[in-house]
Image (cartoon, rainbow, N blue to C red):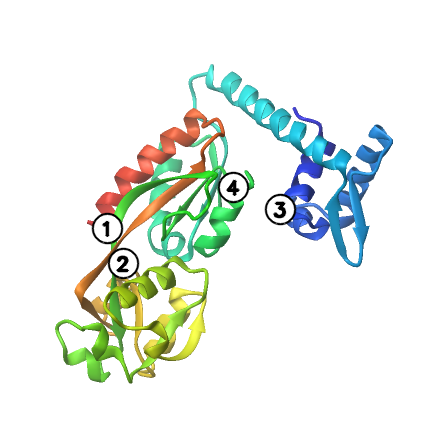
Amino acid sequence: MADRRLQVFHAVAKQMSFTKAADVLFMTQPAVTFQIKQLEEHFNTRLFERGHGRIALTPAGELVLEYAERILAMSGEMETRVKELTGRLSGPLLIGASTTIAEFLLPRVLGEFKAAHPEVEPRLTVANSETIEGRVAEHTLDLGLIEAPSHLAALQTEACCEDELQVVVAPSHALAKLKTVTPKQLVGHAYISRESGSGTREFTDIYLRKAGLDPAQLKAVMELGSPEAIKGVVGTGLGFAILSRVTVEKDQRLGELAALPLAPRLLRSLSLVYPKEKFRSRLVNTFVEFAKSRLKSVTA
């Protein structure tokens, strides 16, 4: 029920870009520009300074943003509470998930949740952990599932299940004959890495440093943003990767890849993140509890 112009203004102010706001809102850039122009005419003042391809909030824009966040939060809470009086869960559920979780863990969870609550409309955004936590902090997602604890003070982090990262190689690779692999045994072998901003990459780097090995000592030959792409390259025998155990279970059964535990083992907690101050609807709370239960059983 909140004024659409206010919703568009809020998105532009958070993204500091008309183009990015248009993408988030699934609108065209001219439509976004028109809504901002209408709001500026309503207040009879400029809300953004524009110049040199960049925008910035004016003092009036800063004030409007402060009120917009409160108005939009209250409007969303009101609509949710009224809907909950019917006793049935319904409406959109905006979820963000890092790549590994989205591709290998979440599809089954979402399918089972949708079957139990057919009037709910899950909408999944897939990106690396850093991007997802940013979107949750901007309130463009209800919650996120990421591979690392959040670095943002505005977010609440809640561990939901444990995951193990292992060394993944082609069966013909020299490391494949080992039962476990120490970090020092990786030195000298070609390394196919996840991209910067990935939770898997962050955890791997932290683990290596704790083991006394600078990540720069590894012979990184490629950085890729998808576990599937990494598995495809590793399958050629080019080198090794460090990936979640759940991403290669099927490939192991088919004999296409080998996964070897690190020594000591590399364990991490997958996390749910959501805004600390934002009202959480019964729909979000129900999904959080459902997801925690199912993810624990899937990763056990």
Measured along the vertical axis of the image, is residue 216 above or below residue 280?
below
Q: Is residue 15 visible?
A: yes
Helix, strand or loop for disc 3: helix
- Mark 1 belongs to which amino acid? Thr
Q: Which mark is residue 24?
A: 3
Q: Is residue 125 visible?
A: no
Q: Earlier in the sequence, mark 4 or mark 2?
A: 4
For the residues labelled 3 and 2, say whether their Cβ atoms are less than 8 Å apart.
no
- At 18% across and 73% down in the image, what residue appears? 181
Q: Position of residue 120 (x, y in %)?
A: 46, 32
> How far is disc 1 from disc 2 in space, using C-alphas?
7 Å
> How far is disc 4 from disc 3 in space, using C-alphas?
14 Å
Q: Quadrant of residue 138?
A: top right
- Mark 2 belongs to which amino acid? Val
For the residues labelled 1 and 2, say whether their Cβ atoms are less than 8 Å apart.
yes
Residue wearing tag 2? 246
- At 67% across and 47% down in the image, what residue appears? 21
Measured along the vertical axis of the image, is residue 156 above or below residue 133?
above
Q: Position of residue 108 (x, y in %)?
A: 33, 47
Helix, strand or loop for disc 1: helix
- Mark 3 belongs to which amino acid? Val
Helix, strand or loop for disc 4: helix
As rendered, which of 3 and 255 lies closer to the eye? 3
Left or right side of 268 for 280: right
Q: Position of residue 167 (x, y in %)?
A: 25, 70
Q: Which mark is residue 299?
A: 1
Q: Which mark is residue 137?
A: 4
Q: Earlier in the sequence, mark 3 or mark 2?
A: 3
- Mark 4 belongs to which amino acid? Ala
